[in-house]
Amino acid sequence: MKSKLTEHILGLIFVSIILLSVIFFFDFDSLQSSSPASSEAQLLSGVPITNVNDPFQQQLLQNVMDIYYPGHKDKNIKTVREIFRIREDQFNQKLQSSHVHEKLSLSKLLDLAGMYLKFLVIYVIVMVLTYYGVQTIAVWRFVSKKRLFEHRLAHEANPQKVPARKISRFLSSFFKVIAYMILFSPAYVIAYSIRTEFNTDSSIFMILLGLISNGLLVMYSNKFYAFLVAESRKGYVEAGLVKNLEYRYSFPKDRHGNPCGTIDWKSIVRPVKQFKCHIFDHIFRNAHYQYLSTIKEQASFLITGLIIIEMALNIHGYLNYEMLRQLLYKNYDIVLTIVLGIFYTVKFTEIITDFIVHRESLKYEN
Amino acid sequence: MKTEKRSFLLSIFLNKDHRWAMIWVLGVAVLGIWDIMFLNKPALLRVTNGFINTIIICLLVVIFTLILSWGLTLGLHFFQYRKIRSGYIVLTFILNLVRSVPQIIGVLLSYVIIAALITRGWIGGAGVFVLMAFCMSVFIFMEMVDLMRERISHFTKLDFYNAMKVCGISEKRIINSDILWKNSRIHIFNKLISVFGSAVFLQCSVDFIISVGLSTGVNTVSMPVTLGSLLAKMDSKQDILAIGNTLFNPGYLPQLFMQHLQGLTVAFLIVFSLFCIYSISNGYAERHRL
């Protein structure tokens, strides 16, 4: 853990130094595009001219050029024309970008801090909801499959062919495909398709989109399900059965309503999942331990999803929309400040995840 | 006893990955036929170009990811094997830094740079595709490096590794041929399918964002047309908005498939492709018990 923490801190320091030096010491104005001109005109474009449309100043510059470069009259005329064109372009550009050009100031930093806080709140809420959703969906899927398998085993002797069951199976497959298509839709497809009827610019809608779109929930619940399946095939499951742990998934509560050894709806949807006296409790705990190490990846994917939502939907007053806006206006110092903020979020998530995994591993590893 | 070779149709029926690959191809083909009948020619050409460009870039991403991850895995392994600690630490540090940059930010910023290079006339044509794919693979390939390193670390703990070394087989051959190729290619291929899906998602999202948010700053005409940039066009967006209208006016549904075909086709291609690629990857993992 110590080496991991050192690496994270070094990473934070390294990136902070690089980005902060670029923000404070790099001249971003030099990146602004200017129209192509001859090197001579570029060199002389800094000569003091107060009014580019003043014929007197034009003539004055022409005369000065003729004195300094005698015998090159045609070339001097061309250079002077180019100097005046460059100055006019610069003036127009300045005029056009005067309302969009911003510098990183204290008030701007406070603005960004507010947006960053909003982003963090949304991120934490969606992260907690996906953490819960991934486990609940995977457990529900695993238990349902086991129950179906047990049901089939019990009725194998006299299988009933009911046409209604076929129809219901077809309908359930149809709705499953529709649900999957929605869950796999990128956020902007879902948002644009309902934008005319609902307000899609609220934080609640963002949380909802972050949760259900971009395939996040499906992919990670499938990963958790795969961990559950892999664990259920391991040897300790049989050892647990020998020790008289309950193994049936469709086992009802006993006469006294004792929940020990049963897996009911309550235990599946509970935030802290426990399946006491059942072998599944051990399967779940081992799968959960493996899932913890994928949280870093899930968090990174979630942040990507949230950035896409904010940018694609052009939601004003949000951090990533602001980043896109500043990128458009070429205010790169503000863009880099936002990138640094997002980098810190990812790094702190990684540190917290590593700490949790380390704490869990102390429980299981010798 | 010689087992019977499964027929093509039987394999499609039994194997989930084959079945979904077929569904993807058939779905796109059916949509293509529908579009030929009802979508106007310029729009059809744009959609076809967008789909083909997206697939080409994503395939290039897969190739670059494989090359980058294989190379870096070997680099990391040999630094570790030859006990060059400084090299190993520096490489791991750089990899972890890249991992900490959200993919979308990395790809977005690199696309802005690519657009600037195109505007200045420094790159063009096929070079744009290659550069776009390379930039995207830089932010995707870490998962593959993790997988390859996991496989190498698993196999180096087994007896066969030491036995092969005692037999005088070179480390390079054991890693490249015996561990990565002979014993891990199924895992690697499965990961590459996921990488292809991630590339489709990122490509479409970044192009959509650039076309919506940076259209005046970045000259989107100079970037290749993809499904994402097509979806961001005003007429496509209006087509997608029509879906919301249909939710409360179901009578409008038939017109959706005739009058709003461009946007619907693009959105369907993105969602359907992502879903099919996910199912193919899942089916492949199930078939090989990964």
Image (cartoon, coloured by chain):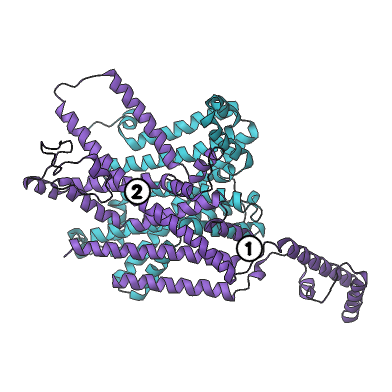
Chain colours: A purple, B cyan
Residue B176, image x, y percentages: 32, 58
Q: Residues within 10 Å of mark 2 (few under 14, many from 20)?
A: many
Residue A294 shown left or right of residue B126 in the figure: left
Q: Is there CB contact under 8 Å for labels 1 and 2?
A: no
Q: Secondary structure at mark 1?
A: loop
Q: Quadrant of the N terminus of chain A?
A: bottom left
Which residue was labeled with disc 1? A330
Camera-side residue: A282 or A260? A260
Residue B274, image x, y percentages: 44, 42
Extreme residue in the bottom direction:
A68
Q: Residues within 10 Å of mark 1 (few under 14, many from 20)?
A: many
A328 lies above or below A143: below
Q: Amino acid at mark 1?
A: Lys
Give residue A220's mark.
2
A62 lies above or below A302: below
Residue B169 shown left or right of residue B260 in the figure: left
Camera-side residue: A16 or B268? A16
